[in-house]
Image (spheres, rainbow, N blue to C red):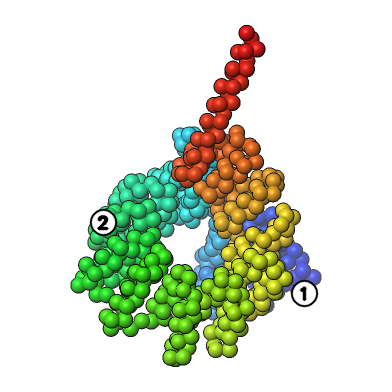
Amino acid sequence: MMFSGGPKALSSTVLYCQCCYINKRYQSLKQLFLRVYSSNFCSCYNNLTQVHDRCGNNRGYDQMQKSSLSYRIFHKNFHAEKNLSSDQDAISSSVCDKVSTKDSTIKDATFIQNLLKVHESHSEVESALAQQEILVTKELVCEVLRRHQSQWKSALFFFNWAESRQGYSHDSHAYNQMLDILGKMKQFKLMRQLVESIPSEKRAMVVTEKTFEILLNRYAGGHKVEEAIDMFHKRKDFGLKLDNVAFQTLLRSLCRYKHVEVAESLFYLKKDEFPPDIKSRNIILNGWCVAGRLYEAKRFWNDIITSGCKPDLFTYGIFINSLTKAGKLGTAVKLFNTMWEKGHPPDVAICNCIIDALCFKKKIPDALVIFREMNEKGCEPDTATYNSLIKHICNIRRMDEAYKLLDEMEENGCHPNARTYNYFLKSLAKPDEVPLLLKRMKKSGCRITGDTYNLILKLFIQWDYFEGVQSIWNEMEKTGLGPDQRSYTLMVHGLYKKGSMDKALSYFKAMISKGMIPEPRTKLLVKAIELKEDANDHQSKSVTSKNRS
């Protein structure tokens, strides 16, 4: 098949390329590519560009034409015409690798995910894996771990299995993913064992700032404050500095999970070692705000003012947020207006805070006034601005206005996120409206998150649409975004309310088998189901005994 030769030949080439890619005939694509390469460069490259345009979104061919390595070698040989055969090998190898690697990773990850789901015994999984020719790569490991974020047992088994494969060694991404999974599932002993088991010769390569951020967050989130502080001081053992940035990471982790007293004590205790700046002060102030402790927030605000440390926009934003959360909207608006008057214009985050507070107090018209004034004063609204308005307008079921805001949002270049569409989902009244909204969501380029899946799951259960429940459950498994602890909790409680106690118990048992820790309310509910079943069994046996007598 010749490449050059007019429109008819070009059309045939386009069709041939498309057929090869659809049928995964990468070797044929490779041969065509080399044929183009070995003929006259200029004319063939022009035709190659036309093929790319005609192929549209043909991913395989697009990668082939855009490959930086291929492009470099084209120009090198066009000007030098040396070592043609070795360069042809380099081109074909690069092209075919790029086309097939991603597909191969997804295929292998899906296979491994299904194995882990079908076989409860890890020895059976290991035996099945031994029979397959699976190339363990960093991309494959990360993809499999991503699909098991809420199933720490399966994730840890695969993580250990992959590490034992010859020619493979975990990088920082794999360690960080595994540590995060263990911390999320409250497996702190295993999390510590894993990080301390990293060989000393590898620590400098795999232990990063992100690693310690994950560790501190998970310890603080599990209320393991002493362990978090202890892990912070172990940074030196892993070749990392104990500097102000690292200290702020510790303060942020503690404050995020409401251990603000400890964070403030450390802040003052370590002031000689880690000189206090406005960023560290903002972290503590924000901690009191998030904890809902307005008195402490005011005290710390006054400390900042008297310390001579000049408040920045974040300081104002945090304190205004604290006032609004405490219901002091009038004081917050007054401080907000003072910023404009004193020539310290608030940023979009502060405007969003005031808009959200006004909407919460049912003062949507006032919020819309600030929203319209933002552009006039040079402060452009962002996605969070629109989300605040959409959320509250959806709550009062003014759906026409909400969709107008969504249209305006997209026209102004603000990309809706999963939270935007979740507000619309909560306002839906029947199952057949869900696919239409999801279609718009995907069209806008917004990815569905685990929270969105769980919201749809909750809605389908409420609507008794169990065909949809199963469909969403399967899709969550397929994408790796669940089912998580929240998904199982929804199923257990939802099925109980619908009277399906046996099914509720089966989901609870599946949840436990995956190493998930149920909420206290779920444990109480299951205990009530078991007591009820025991009572029914006892009553049934009594009736049978009476009938016999």
Q: Quadrant of residue 303?
A: bottom left
Q: Residue furthest left?
A: 272
Q: Residue at x 48, y 40 (%)?
A: 523
Which residue is more in the foreground, 328 or 26?
328
Say which of marks 2 and 1 sits in front. 2
Q: Residue furthest top?
A: 549
Q: Position of residue 136 (x, y in %)?
A: 47, 50
**Which amino acid type corresponds to the residue marked 2 in the rendered image?**
Asp
Q: Quadrant of residue 279?
A: bottom left
Report which residue position mark 2 lands on. 230
Q: Give the position of the N terminus as an image quadrant.
A: bottom right
Q: Quadrant of residue 428?
A: bottom right
User: Label 2 vs label 1: CA separation?
Assistant: 72 Å
Mark 2 neighbour density, 10 Å: few (under 14) some (14–19) many (20 or more): few
Which residue is more in the foreground, 53 or 517?
517
Q: Position of residue 271 (x, y in %)?
A: 22, 72
Q: Residue at x 75, y 73 (%)?
A: 5
Q: Is residue 524 visible?
A: yes
Report which residue position mark 1 lands on. 6
* Above or below: residue 225 compared with residue 493: below
Q: Position of residue 322 (x, y in %)?
A: 43, 71
